[in-house]
Image: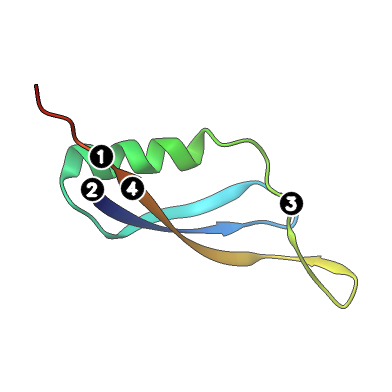
Amino acid sequence: VFIVYVKFFIEKDGTTSNISVIKGIHPDYDKEAIKLIENMPVWKPGIKNNRFVRTEMILPIKWTILYD
């Protein structure tokens, strides 16, 4: 199992932005992890004092590589 750590922001409207890999394993897997975050459905934004706020996230994405 290999893990790619991706950092991004969830905006007030629930969209993602500023996606970047903070710890990668290989450029191909890193690109796929970014693509995965870009294609996710809209998130629920963070809430502070009953207002939606921009929230920073770090998400570990686990890759299992199977060999024949």
Residue in the picture at 68% in, 47% down: 43
10 vs 60, left or right, is right
Q: Which residue is mark 2?
A: 1
As drawn, the residue found furthest toward the left would be: 68
In the image, what residue type sits under mark 2? Val
- Image disc number at residue 64: 1
How packed is label 1: few (under 14 Cα within 10 Å), some, or many (20 or more)? few
Q: Find out whether the residues at labels 1 and 4 contact each other: C-beta distance under 8 Å.
A: yes
- Image disc number at residue 44: 3
Residue in the picture at 52% in, 33% down: 39
Residue 6 picture location, percent across and down? 39, 56
In the image, what residue type sits under mark 4? Lys
How packed is label 4: few (under 14 Cα within 10 Å), some, or many (20 or more)? few
Q: Find out whether the residues at labels 2 and 4 contact each other: C-beta distance under 8 Å.
A: yes
- Image disc number at residue 62: 4
31 vs 14, left or right, is left
SS at badge 4 = strand
Residue 53 picture location, percent across and down? 74, 67
SS at badge 1 = loop
Task: Give the quarter of the image for residue 11.
Answer: bottom right
Q: Find out whether the residues at labels 2 and 1 contact each other: C-beta distance under 8 Å.
A: yes
Q: Earlier in the sequence, mark 3 or mark 4?
A: 3
In the image, what residue type sits under mark 3? Lys
Front-most of residues 63 and 54:
63
Q: Earlier in the sequence, mark 1 or mark 3?
A: 3
SS at badge 3 = loop
Q: In the displayed structure, would residue 5 be above or below residue 32?
A: below
Front-most of residues 33 and 16:
33
Disc number lying in front (1 or 3): 1
43 vs 24, left or right, is right
Residue in the picture at 15% in, 46% down: 26
